Image (spheres, helix red, strand yellow):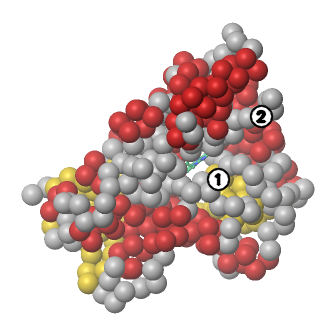
Amino acid sequence: MNEKIFSSYPERISWNGTQSRREVLRMAGAACLVLGGMSCAGMTRAGMVEPVGKSAAGGLTAAEREVLRLASLAPSGHNTQPWTVRVVGKGRWVIGFDAARALPAVDPGNRELLLSLGAFLENLVLAAGAMGMRAEYSVMAGKPHDRDVLEVRLEEDRKSQDRTGTIIARRTIRKGMLMREIASADLASLCGKDSSAIFLSHGSAGAEWIAGSTMEANRAQAYRNEAQEELANWIRWRDADVMKHRNGLTPAGMEIDGIAGWFVRHFYDRGSVLEKDFRERTVDLVAGQVREGGGWIVMTSRDSTVPELVETGRRFQRLLLGARERMIAVHPMTQALEEAPWRTEAARAIGADGSVQFILRVGYVTRYPDPVSPRMPVEWFVTSSS
Ligand SMILES: Cc1cc2nc3c(=O)[nH]c(=O)nc-3n(C[C@H](O)[C@H](O)[C@H](O)COP(=O)(O)O)c2cc1C
């Protein structure tokens, strides 16, 4: 049996060491057959999505609710979906965050949280445009922990290009990237003309720094208990937990499929993530991953003020949608931006101006898998102030 049956977020799956791996997998395989293919597949997003037009929270129209549902398909660190929306008037929303869905151990400055809100905002603007609404917004927050971050106003407008299909079909992919070079036309389209998204091909000095630092930072983080415990809190091993929380990292989202997926969904728990073996496997898997794919895209911003982080999150989401349309998988690997000393060295080591906000591993895939990470229903993150 291949040792590397598990993939990553945490590339952090381990065996508890008390059983022989072969024995357990045989047992799990037999159980899968008995239970039928269904229970080996785990939860899919399709099985969780509620129908469009369901009665809306906070006095939203059905179209507004759909705009927010599409916005919530944005990526977020550990899939915490930190966004909140307060309806303050007709077509007027205040977007903020829920502190219970922040990640203080790996993101104490809310940098990644604000990038995620930016990705949410980009989806919101695109989805509103596709439905004949223009979304204008202003940044309310002066500091990264201010709870009211953005004010959004919706106005009727002409319909703009409809990219909702791409918003729905996008996902993070961590496995199976081809080693093929990224075509220059694709790079030009993804990175644009400005220098805030830099491509580094494998073998270049910058790419070598990223590969080495990503590995070392993963190792440091895997053994930093506070970070590992936070991660453990956000992994939903059981299907029932996925349905209960509708956020966090799931076996399917971490691409732990088949028999291995069945096994972890039934036998893993919070404690498994804190075991030494699990932490070691993380580092092993990252070591393999950093050598896979077509290279890296590094996204930078002028500084790390709230407006810059929100705008960088928007650009990130646009890049992800463009990549989806070109069959390019994107895997954010953030640990080198979370751990010292790498986070302060990144810009200089890569030769980038400004602050590094994303390190993205990119590569073509022959088959783009369906999205599987769960999302909370709109009603869970919308409130009304009236
Ligand atoms: C700011 C940010 C940081 C992220 N960091 C990582 C990371 O270090 N490793 C990883 O595998 N995925 C990372 N992700 C991807 C998220 O885990 C992913 O978006 C989330 O689980 C939802 O899944 P989806 O993108 O398939 O919808 C990051 C995403 C964001 C927005």
**Label 1 within 8 A of ligand 1 by Cβ:** yes
Assess disc 2: are there few (<14), some (14-19) or many (≥20) residues with their C-alpha within 10 Å of its C-alpha.
few
Q: What residue type is labelled 1?
A: Ile
Point out the tag, 2 or 1, that comes first from the N-terminus.
2
Which residue: 81% across, 41% down?
A: 288
* Above/below status of 133 relative to 290: below
User: Residue 237 vs residue 330: left or right?
Assistant: left
Q: Report the front residue among 312 and 296.
A: 296
Residue with the mark numbered 1: 173
Q: Helix, strand, or loop for circle 1? A: loop
Residue beneath disc 2 = 4
Instruction: Give the quarter of the image for residue 157.
Output: bottom left
For the point 67% across and 78% down, the residue is 189
Q: Does the rendering let one see residue 58?
A: yes
**Contact check, label 2 and label 1, Cβ < 8 Å:** no
Q: Does residue 218 appear anywhere in the picture? A: no
User: What separation in Å lies between label 2 and label 1 (alpha carbons)?
Assistant: 16 Å
> Which x, y percent locates residue 172?
60, 54
Q: Which residue lies furthest to the left in this view?
A: 386
- Residue at 63% x, 40% y is 257
Quadrant housing residue 23: top right
At x 41% / y 85%, what residue is drawn? 160
Residue 276, compared with residue 160, is above or below; it is above
Taking 98 as reference, is 238 left or right?
right
In the displayed structure, would residue 5 be above or below residue 196? above
Toward the top, the furthest residue is 18
Task: Kindly identify the amino acid type of the residue bearing the numbered disc 2.
Answer: Lys
Question: Residue 21's x, y, as percent?
Answer: 74, 20
Query: In the drawing, does residue 130 fall left or right of residue 332?
Result: left
Locate residue 185: give its quadrant: bottom right
Pointer 1: residues within 10 angstroms few (<14), some, or many (20+)?
many
- For the N terminus, give its image quadrant: top right
